[in-house]
Amino acid sequence: MSGPLKISQPVDGETYARILQFYAQQMQLLDERAAEEWAEGFTEDGVFAQNVKPEPWAGRAVIAARMRAGMDRLATRDVQRRHWFGMVAADRQDAGTVLTRYYAMVFETPNGGRATTYLSTTGEDVLVLQDDQWRIRHRLITHDGT
Amino acid sequence: MSGPLKISQPVDGETYARILQFYAQQMQLLDERAAEEWAEGFTEDGVFAQNVKPEPWAGRAVIAARMRAGMDRLATRDVQRRHWFGMVAADRQDAGTVLTRYYAMVFETPNGGRATTYLSTTGEDVLVLQDDQWRIRHRLITHDGT
Amino acid sequence: MSGPLKISQPVDGETYARILQFYAQQMQLLDERAAEEWAEGFTEDGVFAQNVKPEPWAGRAVIAARMRAGMDRLATRDVQRRHWFGMVAADRQDAGTVLTRYYAMVFETPNGGRATTYLSTTGEDVLVLQDDQWRIRHRLITHDGT
């Protein structure tokens, strides 16, 4: 983890709203186990890295397949996960590129049970604008406590 | 629960900021037990549905009265609840109508005790613009784990 | 705690986005234990008050020094804290002054352990615009359960 962004240029209000809506929609897809639609949020050549995985997932098709496999394993446990992003700091690089750093919390509710905290992480994205839609070129998720 | 929104038109930055501020203010009123002021966030004919209730509350006056009754019951326990909305996805229907889907977490702190997670939910609103103020025409809250 | 803001004028989308980005960046600095950079988010004569402290910290230099001391104490415990702000309601006072009221949750992850809720609070800021950057003139944090 590289620490907070050095922010030279915070993004404008329109861009910030679009990025927050993108994050909201994409993670809601994840939590409904729509792995393939969630993976559409990455560029074709996008990379998804996590500090707890030996190597990054490279390419949208790989990202979708690996997430689908993870979801299938999770389906054997009867829980609902909710991924929250917050504290999104953003730095504009150019008209079509934004860096973000944010917090992501995962909450988990077992069927018939009570919500609990599951995981606290930080995220760092390279976002690019494609056809008026922000997509992830590179995401690094770093788990706290590791 | 109908799953993530199919978003055709994300809302612009001004609208998104107004909706987030509306949610913030309205739920802060709830957590201060201002049931009647909280209910002002619904239209006169607004509906508040929860998947854990046998039927929706229909009409602002009914919504206020039912919430007031719930608050009075809660007052017998010495706790502070905090309702957080997050991951707000929004889809513009027309100039005066926006659909949203979001996550809502409730945290609870007992007097003299430590904060805990209480409840994880998803929310789906039909918002309408009245006199330059967004209000809820229909809200559905779906509890996780049910 | 004075309760929810009486909002006469919600801030515009550009201002709201800038304030959220300021909060995100500033609290990420705190969680990386950059006390002095975090304190740059206050005005020179800024005040940081907490309802659990006998008196407020007055002046940026004092705020930085007191936070540095607190961080040094925390460093003896092997935990990662994450400060989340959410539900930010904002009321514009004039072109260079905004009042906010928000929720702040602190999550904590011990090294090798699982994330937990640590603290639920409300915050009330007087923000002022200096050299195109929002800074805190006065912050009051009120812990729930006290």
Image (cartoon, coloured by chain):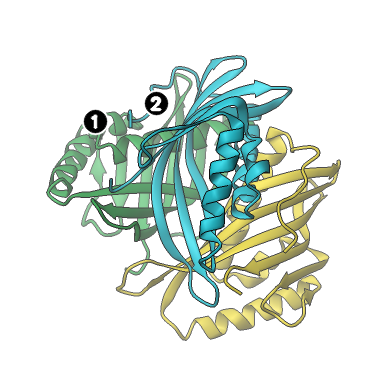
Chain colours: A cyan, B yellow, C green
Find disc 1 in the rendering and name its residue.
Answer: C36
Residue pointed to by mark 2: A5
- The image position of residue B132, as x and y in percent, is 78, 45
Instruction: Tell whether B52 sits left or right of C32.
Output: right
The single residue placed furthest to the right in the displayed view is B94
**Can you see residue A138?**
yes
Label 1 is found on which chain of the structure?
C
Q: Position of residue B87 (x, y in %)?
A: 59, 48
Q: Amino acid at mark 2?
A: Leu
The quadrant in which the C terminus of chain C is found is bottom left
Compared across the picture, whether B146 is left or right of B97 comes to left
Can residue C91 be seen here? The reply is no
Residues tagged 1 and 2 counted as in contact (Cβ below 8 A): no
Q: Toward the viewer: B134 or B140?
A: B140
Instruction: From the top left corner, tell me how far across and down residue A29 is, in percent.
Output: 65, 48
Quarter of the image where the N terminus of chain C is located: bottom left
